[in-house]
Structure formats: structure tokens, C-alpha cells
Image: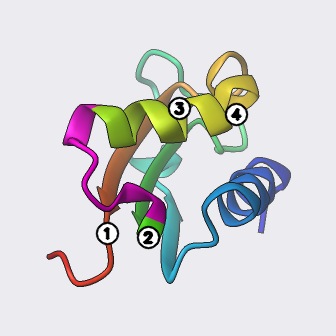
Amino acid sequence: MGAILEAIQNKLTATFQPTRLEIEDDSARHHGHAGAREGGESHFNVLIEAEAFRGAPKVMRQRMVYKALAEELAGPVHALSLKALAPGEA
């Protein structure tokens, strides 16, 4: 596990106490594209399920996650594909 992926995992776990958290480093698919970094850890897919998202609209959920990951999104992370769910949602 890379340092950036670990930071994302730690911050999302501490902030949301998720019941489900899947993080995939998708950087290899973006090799040669804008924002791609040598060694990866620039593009991520995240699926997070947490009670904190219950009743919140999709845009608010995204803002909550972006706030928790502000440092990563301002620097090493170029792209984040996000699916934020409340428990029981598909």
C-alpha cells in the first residue's frame, strides 16, 4: 500500500467510521495522461459507506469527502472517482 492510499484510508476512516471502504489506485490506467505521476498514486476510485451520509444529497456527500481529503486533492491526487453511500444503499 502506497503512502497516499494509506493517508486516504486513514483520513476517511477517522472522519466517517465507514462500514465499507474500498480504495483502488487507478493510476496505471491513466499513464501518459494529464496529472499522472511516475510511480502512480495520482488517480483513485473510492467507494465509502457510512452513516454520516444518511439523508445527505450526493453533492453534499462529495463535499464532505473532499473536505476530509483537501490536502491530498490539493497536491498528489489528480483525480478521485467517488461513490459515497449510506448503509443499505446500493
Label 2, label 1: how far apart the Cα atoms are:
5 Å
Question: How crowded is the residue under tag 3: few (<14 C-alpha within 10 Å), some, or many (20+)?
Answer: some
Pointer 1: what residue?
Answer: 86
Q: Which residues are magenta?
A: 52-59
Pointer 4: what residue?
Answer: 38
Say whether marks 4 and 1 touch (CB < 8 Å): no
Label 2, label 4: how far apart the Cα atoms are:
36 Å
SS of the residue at dot 3? helix
Label 3, label 2: how far apart the Cα atoms are:
17 Å
Residue 17: quadrant of the picture: bottom right
Which residue of the protein is positioned furthest toward the left in this rendering? Answer: 90
Pointer 2: what residue?
Answer: 51
SS of the residue at dot 2? helix
SS of the residue at dot 1? loop
Nearer the N terminus, badge 2 or badge 4?
4
Residue 59: quadrant of the picture: top left
Figure quadrant of the C terminus: bottom left
